Image: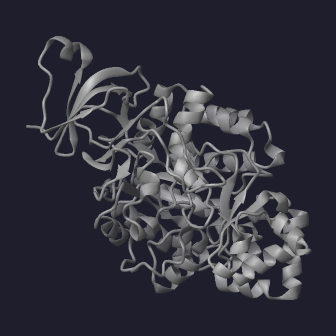
Amino acid sequence: MAELVIRDADVVDGTGGPAYRADVVVDGGRIVSIVKEAATAGGRRPSAARELDAEGLVLSPGFIDMHAHSDLALLRDPEHTAKAAQGVTLEVIGQDGLSYAPVDDRTLAEVRSAITGWNGHGDDIDFDWRTVGEYLDRLDRGIAVNAAYLIPQGTVRALAVGWEDREATATELGRMRRLVAEGLEQGAVGMSSGLTYTPGMYAKDAELTELCRVVASYDGYYCPHHRSYGAGALEAYEEMVALTREAGCPLHLAHATMNFGVNKGRAPELLALLDEALAAGADITLDTYPYTPGSTTLAALLPSWANEGGPARALERLTDEGTTARIRHHLEVLGSDGCHGVPVEWETIEISGVTSPALAEYVGHTVLESATRRGEEPWTTAHRLLVEDRLGPTILQHVGHEENVRLIMRHAVHTGGSDGILQGAKPHPRAYGTFPEYLGRYVRELGVLSLEECVAHLTSRPAARLRLPDRGLVSEGYRADLVLFDPATVAAGSSFAQPRTLPTGIPHVLVDGRFVIEDGRRTDVLAGRAVRRTPTARG
């Protein structure tokens, strides 16, 4: 007898086709039978050891978060309720060119410091891995949801070249190529870059093209946080399209939006660029989150030269009066490359988290608000935070445009990604709310997408990009990574005021056929594992 039958579900199967009523049978972690309503009406209904009445609920494939920052969160808190409660059954981590494998002792310490704002410093983590394969093995000890990994190009560059702003030598480029190949052979699905973050941003296009050739040879994809989302955003998108076309590498554009005042109303230009490339044969997808503010670290706004040499050197520069004055001029007057070429507007920079409890008073306020309260200039406040918290503050950057968000999410190659940073007292609500926000606000309330379209964006499309042959659809033989939600009530509970509130209307989530969320509550099941690709190199 099968383990479970989900009875009378309204199946939205991920294809984008119309919903249908069916009984869905699960056994051994897979969907073994789908019996549609017409068959059950006059015939014998399937049975199982357990029945779940899904009357009034939609059954869909589990959601795939194409842009997650849970690299340490999965280890620190394997239950991972923030994502499981949203119906997420697979996350793609190793994003924005900086993560924790492959490393040696030196680069591990540097990376931990550089992205403390994303993931915490990791003092509570046993870093008992150095390679991509060893990190994936660590995930296999048990996590709530599945995870796929992108090789972080910035980490690879730190390992082979260091944190200096210079071209790689032929020997160093050869080592980077080998590191990328080894990571792909060990199960990574592609490579990410953070081209406004050091040291990845120091790579010229020729270097990135060579690494993308390696990725393409293993049938992976390239996922860049490109060089600008502000001034020069379209040129940055064009650069990534041209680079990957030359390398013959599939392209997935991370958190693909058009931000800052210079890009208000310019989403049609981005989509026209992509449509032209797609028509010419390019293999392109993208992800977005359904909110207007972005989120990163305060240190990321600094000009790239201020971060050269790594976090320790950046802190040294911030304690030198003359250098600090130069940094301020680049930020406030010229528009630093770290701030996407746009002069910083301190009223848009909200502190979302700090690592030092002594600085907690700044959280939830913009830099301008805190500066006004203290009777000082905004730069003085920002500088204090950077130095006293040792580059640790995370921020919300209120620079987006709703019309751009809506238009991009309707595109044919769009997928969903939370870009969720789980650190800080008041993180961006997208970390806890992205997927129910799509279903509740943008489907039910605004009608920007139909339910069937939206589910396809969040399931089968990302599965296709990841080249996963048995995920992303409610289909016989597919893995039973499933979510049941009430289309009338599903909604994000998280808000900017209360960002860690869990969603409503998602009573059941299954990973590998096992309930990780049951009757709206987190179980103790840790059915998630590393999702490895095992491609054969083509050359």
Query: Where residue 211 sits: x, y (%)?
Result: 52, 61
Q: Report if residue 413 is visible in the image.
A: no
Name the residue nearer the viewer: 432 or 98: 432
On the rendered structure, is 18 left or right of 402?
A: left
In the image as oriented, which residue stretches furthest toward the top?
Answer: 42
Query: Where residue 241 sits: x, y (%)?
Result: 62, 45
Please identify the quadrant where the N terminus is shown: top left
Name the residue nearer the viewer: 517 or 26: 517
| Picture quadrant where residue 201 is located | bottom right
Name which residue lies at 62% across and 50% down.
495
Query: Where residue 297 sits: x, y (%)?
Result: 67, 67
Query: Where residue 504 sits: x, y (%)?
Result: 48, 42
Its colouring scheme is: one colour
Name which residue lies at 54% across and 44% down.
492
On screen, residue 149 above or below 33: below
On the rendered structure, is 228 left or right of 481?
A: right
Please identify the quadrant where the C terminus is shown: bottom left
On the rendered structure, is 245 left or right of 144?
A: right
Q: Report if residue 271 is visible in the image.
A: yes
Name which residue lies at 34% across and 27% down.
11
